Image (cartoon, rainbow, N blue to C red):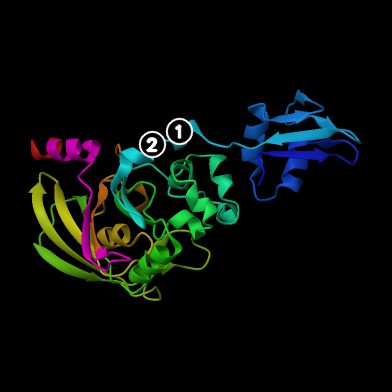
Amino acid sequence: MADKELLQYSGIGQRLDAYLAYEFPEYSREILKGIIKEGRVLVNGQAAKPSLLLEEGDKVEVSWAAHKKEASGLEKLVIFEDKSMLAINKPSGLLVHPLSPIWESNPRAVFEGENTLAAMILAARPETEKQRLPRLGIVHRLDRETSGVMLLAKTLKAQEELTRQFHDGEVSKTYVCIAVGEMKEEKGIIEVPIGRLSGDKKIKASPIGRISVTEYKVLKRLKGYTYVELYPKTGRTNQLRVHMSWLGYPVMGDTLYGAKQEARLMLHSRMAVFKHPITRRKMAMEAPLPPDFKAILQKLGKK
């Protein structure tokens, strides 16, 4: 998509925001309203309001965001990088990619709306778009609230190989979490199928769900909480959160699965072990605990 779109309206009395929603169905009405309010939509050379009624022959100019200030900062997240891939430490609260799938066919759409990791990648590594890398090189994801290691590809060959390793279960992942309650067992295996029932948006433990396996080991018992290491053997959406809740010890801060609201979800992807997509050398990428996670852990340890 070009940085600017020039349109000429033909019709009678249609609102500006409604017209743009028709012309650009890939964007939500709220995003388009935001673009208009930012003054990036001109009607006959003048800034306009979303409610402006267009008239026959009106010239509409839309300026798309070429970059977002908040999209900078990828370099601070990088743990490792070479010519074919990079690993980052994703902060809690950062969405991996826009919810609308249009960004996959129109990468520059990541600069509209909420900031995401995808926007940061495109801002810092514009070659990912030039190479037409699917999903800008993203090969897996973490929940918005989860922090930690993520692997990203910089070439199509690397992306295909990393994607295959995740699909075939060849990537060994280690997470840590603070669970609500003091767990009795030192370690164990949770083999509980999970899935989304028809008509229900929430993923739950269900006998008709997909096979899901998580191993766990207690690292430290705190007063009323447990610091736990988790090893997912399958890669289902929300698997660790669902399994911990099913076990009776939801992840601290996980309001979706039975815990109270906290400053953040206390779940962190600490390590990923895999084979380099090109050299095939075994690699282990580790993301240190972020300061907010560490502070809460230390506070609980003093109780």
Image point (54%, 52%), residue name: 130
Image point (51%, 56%), residue name: 131
Horizontally, residue 109 falls left or right of residue 45, namely left
User: Depth check: 285 or 192 in front?
Assistant: 285
Mark 2 highlights which residue? 73
Mark 1 highlights which residue? 70
* Helix, strand or loop status at disc 1: helix
Q: Which residues are magenta?
A: 274-298
User: Depth check: 67 or 249 in front?
Assistant: 67
Q: Amino acid at mark 2?
A: Gly
Residue 44 disc label = none
Residue 253 within the segment the image draws in magenta: no
Query: Looking at this rendering, what residue extends furthest in the top direction?
Result: 46
At label 1, counting other C-alpha atoms closer than 10 Å, the crowd grade (few under 14, some 14-19, many 20 or more) is few
Please say whether residue 91 is visible from this viewpoint. Answer: no
Q: How many marks?
A: 2
Horizontally, residue 42 falls left or right of residue 269, namely right
**Marks 2 and 1 close (CB-CB < 8 Å):** yes
Please tell me whether residue 284 is drawn above or below residue 50 in the rendered image: below
Image point (51%, 39%), residue name: 114
Expressed as whole percent of the image width and height from the top left, the position of residue 138 reads 43, 56
* Helix, strand or loop status at disc 2: loop
User: Depth check: 217 or 87 in front?
Assistant: 87
* Gap in angstroms between the C-alphas marked 2 and 1: 8 Å
Q: Amino acid at mark 1?
A: Glu
User: Depth check: 132 or 65 in front?
Assistant: 132
Expressed as whole percent of the image width and height from the top left, the position of residue 243 reads 28, 63
At label 2, counting other C-alpha atoms closer than 10 Å, the crowd grade (few under 14, some 14-19, many 20 or more) is some
Horizontally, residue 212 falls left or right of residue 300, namely right
Expressed as whole percent of the image width and height from the top left, the position of residue 78 reads 31, 45
Which of the 4 image quarters holds residue 15? top right
Residue 278 within the segment the image draws in magenta: yes
